Image: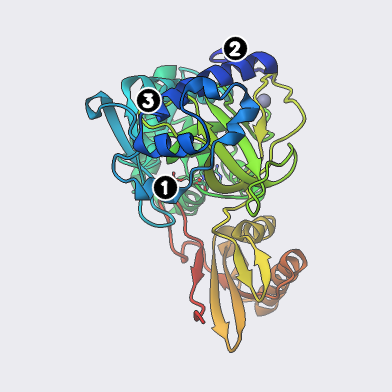
Amino acid sequence: MEVNFWNPEVETMERSQLEALQLKRLQAVIGYALKTPFYQKRLSRAGISRPEDVRSLQELQKIPFTVKDDLRQNFPAGLLAVDMEEVVRIHSSSGTTGVPTVIYLTAEDLNSWTDLLARSIITTGCCRKDIFQNMMSYGLFTGGLGLHYGAERVGMTVIPVGGGNTQRQVQLMRDFKTTVVHVTPSYLLHIHTRLAEFGVKASDLHLRRAFLGAEPYSENTRLKLQELYGIDAYNSYGLSEMNGPSVAFECVYKKDMHLWEDAYIVEIIDPATGQILPDGQKGEVVLTNLVRHAMPLMRYRTRDLAFLHTEPCPCGRTHRRLSRIQGRTDDMLIINGVNVFPSQIEEVIMAIPEVGTNYMIHLTSAGALDKLIVKVEIYSKMFTGDLNSLDALKGKIRDRLRASITINPHIELHEPGSLPVFEGKAKHVVDNREKL
Ligand code: ADP
Ligand code: ZN
C-alpha cells in the first residue's frame, strides 16, 4: 500500500522525541494559560505558577481537568490568553448538548491547525489532483472552514458548497467530477437514497474517498457507504474545543485514527473516578491542545468514549491510534435499567442487508416500563406486498437487536426517504419518556 506523508519527520518521530516535543509545547501552553484568570487560579491551587513547575509529562496529572461547563461559565473571554486584536478567527461548538462554547484562534493557531488538516488529508492518500467537495456546513461550525483551508493547503481543488441542498450536491459532483467529499455519514447515506430521483447512479460519479466525521457511527455504516459508492471512507475525529477536525484521522490502512500527538496530548480516563487507564482500555478521551495559544485548554474532558490501540500501525506513523468513538458519556440511554449506546443499535441494524440508509430510535413510557421503538428504512425492493417476508424481516431485526442489547425492541419498517433527514449532525434518538 502506498503511504504518503505531509511531514514525515514529525509523523514518524520516535516516541522519546515526540514526548520531548510534547513537554516543550506543554510548558509553552502553561505559559499562555497562566495569562488567563481561569487557569491562573486553577494552576496556582495545583502549585503551578511557572511553566517549569511541570517538569515531565507525568506531572501533567497535577493539572485538574477542564470541563465544558468551565467554558460556559467563563464565557466569553475568561479563557482568552492573548489580546483580542491578536485573534483572527472565532469558532463555536454546534451545541449538541446545550449552550454553545466559543473558541479563539490567532493567525499562528490557524496556521498550525491548517497544517494538521493538510497532514490528515495526505494521510488518507489524497493529493493535489483531487477535487474536494466540502459538504460540512460553513460558518461557526469547524468542519466547514477547517477542512477548506487544509484542502487548499494541499492544493486540491475545493468546492465550498457547505451542507444541504442534495440536488445541488449531486449536480456539483457530476459537473466537477468530485473525487473526495467531507460529510457526515448520515448525510452521505441520505444522498444515496436520492440519486435515482436525479437520474444518477453511484457509478456515474467519480468519487474515490470520503472523510466521515462529526457524529458517531458504526463500522458497519462505513462498510455500507464504501459499498454503496465504491469508495474508501476514512474516519475523522475532532471537536471545536480542540480546534475541530484534525485531532485524529485514519491512514490508508483504515485501522482507526492516528491521533496527532505532536499537537494534542491524549489521556483515557475512567469517567467515574478520573483515573488514567492503560492503552487498550476504553474510557473517556481527555485532550490537551499543544498548538493553540489564544485559548489554551488543558486536560479537557471530551465526554467521548474510546480506547487507544497498543499495536503500531503498518504505515510507520508513531502517533497512537484512537478507536472509533463508541458513544458519549452523555448519550448513553438507560432502558429499563440496561445501559445502551445508540451506536450499538446502529451497528446491528446496518449489518442487515435489507436495511436501507436511515433509522430512528424512539423511547416512550409504557406504564412503569420503557418502550424502545426502532424505526428502520428498508430498500424499496422489499415492499413487494408480501407481508410474510416483511414480518420475517422484522423478526430478524428484533432478534439480532435483542441478542446484542438484551432489550426486546419494537421494530417499524419504513420506506426509503421517509424518516427525518439531517444535513449536518444527525439526531437519531427521540426520548419521549415521562420523567418521574
Ligand atoms: P458539539 O459538542 O456541540 O457536538 P462539536 O461540533 O465540536 O460540538 O462536535 C464534536 C463532537 O462530535 C465530538 O466530541 C464527538 O462527540 C462528535 N464527533 C466528531 N467526530 C466524530 C467521529 N469521527 N466519530 C464519532 N463522533 C464524532
Ligand atoms: Zn497508520
- Which numbered disc covers residue 149? 3
Which image quadrant for residue 81? top left
Badge 2 residue CB within 8 Å of ligand 2: no
Residue 155 can be seen, yes or no: no
Judge from the rendering whether residue 324 lies leftward or rightward of residue 178; answer left or right.
right
Q: Is residue 151 left or right of residue 301?
A: left
Counting from the top left corner in percent of width and height, residue 48 is at 50, 30
Quarter of the figure with residue 226:
top right
Q: Position of residue 91 (x, y in %)?
A: 33, 38
Q: Indicate how the structure is coloured in the image.
A: rainbow
* Residue 302 drawn at (x, y percent): 53, 45
Closest to the observer, 59 or 19: 59
Circle 1 Cα neighbour tier, 10 Å, few/some/many (<14 / 14–19 / ≥20)? some
Q: Looking at the image, tell me whether mark 3 or mark 2 is earlier in sequence order.
A: 2
Task: Give whichever of 422, 107 is nearer the camera.
Answer: 107
Which sits earlier in the primary sequence, circle 1 or circle 2? 2
Residue receiving disc 2: 8
> Counting other residues with Cα less than 10 Å from the Cα at mark 3, is it few (<14), some (14-19), or many (20 or more)?
some
Spatial CA span between label 1 and label 2: 37 Å
Q: Can residue 160 be seen by looking at this rendering?
A: yes
Q: Secondary structure at mark 1?
A: helix
* Residue at image mark 1: 70
Write the residue at 61% across / 35% down.
61
Marks 3 & 2, CB-CB < 8 Å contact: no
Label ID, residue 388:
none
How dense is the environment of label 2, judged by Cα within 10 Å: few (below 14), some, or many (20 and up)? few
